[in-house]
Amino acid sequence: MSTMNRAISEQPIGTIRVGSPSYPEMLKNIPKPPEEFFVRGNLDAVHPAVAIVGTRKATAVGLKTAEEFARKLGEAGFAIISGLALGIDSAAHRGALKAGAKTVAVLGCGIDKVYPAHNEILAEEIIKCGGAVISEYPAGHSVRKYNFLDRNRIISGLALATIVVESPARSGSLRTAGCAAEQGRTVFVIPGPISHPNYEGSHALIRDGATLVTSVEEIISDLGLGNMIARRARNTGENNKQNALIEILRRTGAPLNLDEIIELTGLGMPEIASLLTALAIEGKVAENGGRYEII
């Protein structure tokens, strides 16, 4: 057994059953949801999520596109769902990891295996970075071709939308897109050269009614999540400023007055007053005689 196989095998396996509070709401509402599935890692907070899928034999452009879309969507607050296959799936997981976003890999084999074995390191990284590797197949279940077709409904079922990057005329990603449509979820397709065989299935999806997209902004807008993403960005920015202010107070090691805080942060009086008020309410900062210190 390889070092990475041992690392994966040492991760505890959790079981989530229909009816459990931890069963994902999005997955619960699809036709034929799995009665139970198995988890290594952390499946909490995977909403909102999008799935990114495509061919195993991707071009360099396709790999770059999948990774870039996953990274930008991860930075916008989305979890990324895919199947841990070679090609587009792997690029999508890597893009999410680069963004520090949660990503979930859905296996088509037993939870005790990583298939393909080439992606053992990627699976371990997904778990270490707060994501999860899941399967509806228990430990010891062998690798079978039809398992991968069945698992595609879980990939799309965990997501608000499925994004297809490079799908040939015969591709498992077409099955995932079909599952998404059956589940009432949006299917987005990134187009490519009309003469390239890797896009025959992609363009067929567009002809059949899938939504053509060329940017992450189009995806966010079409999902109607622009306001939510903007709010999250503002909240993140506010939290970052609070953390920076706390770090300044910690480094100085002595209470500071408003003028000193303004000079050290470069922020204006109204913003500093707002940050200090919020931190005081949270019990993180105290004011004494016009000087502020961390508690």
Image: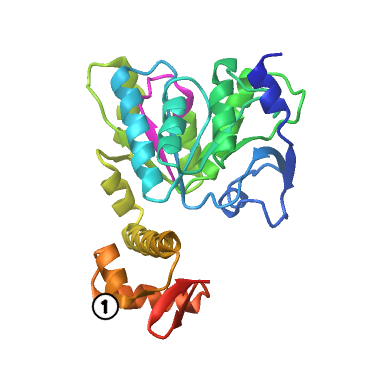
Picture quadrant where residue 214 is located: top left
In this rendering, position of residue 240 left or right of residue 221 = right
Q: Residue at x 53, y 75 (%)?
A: 283
Q: Is residue 185 visible?
A: yes
Q: Position of residue 57 (x, y in %)?
A: 41, 15
- Nearest the viewer among 2 and 113 is 2
Q: Position of residue 162 (x, y in %)?
A: 43, 40
Q: Is residue 153 visible?
A: no
Picture quadrant where residue 3 is located: top right
Quarter the N terminus occupies: top right
Residue 193 part of the magenta segment: no
Q: Residue at x 41, y 25 (%)?
A: 88
Q: Residue at x 24, y 64 (%)?
A: 266
Question: What kind of residue is marked 1?
Answer: Pro
Picture layout, residue 148 above or below residue 236: above
* Secondary structure of the residue carrying numbered label 1: helix
Q: Residue furthest bottom?
A: 289
Residue 169 part of the magenta segment: yes
- Nearest the viewer among 168 and 108 is 108
User: What is the crowding at mark 1: few (fewer than 14 residues within 10 Å), some, or many (at least 20)?
Assistant: few
Q: Which residue is mark 1?
A: 270
Q: Position of residue 258 (x, y in %)?
A: 31, 76
Query: What's drawn in magenta, residue-wise?
Result: 161-173
Q: Position of residue 70 (x, y in %)?
A: 38, 37
Picture layout, residue 57 above or below residue 67: above
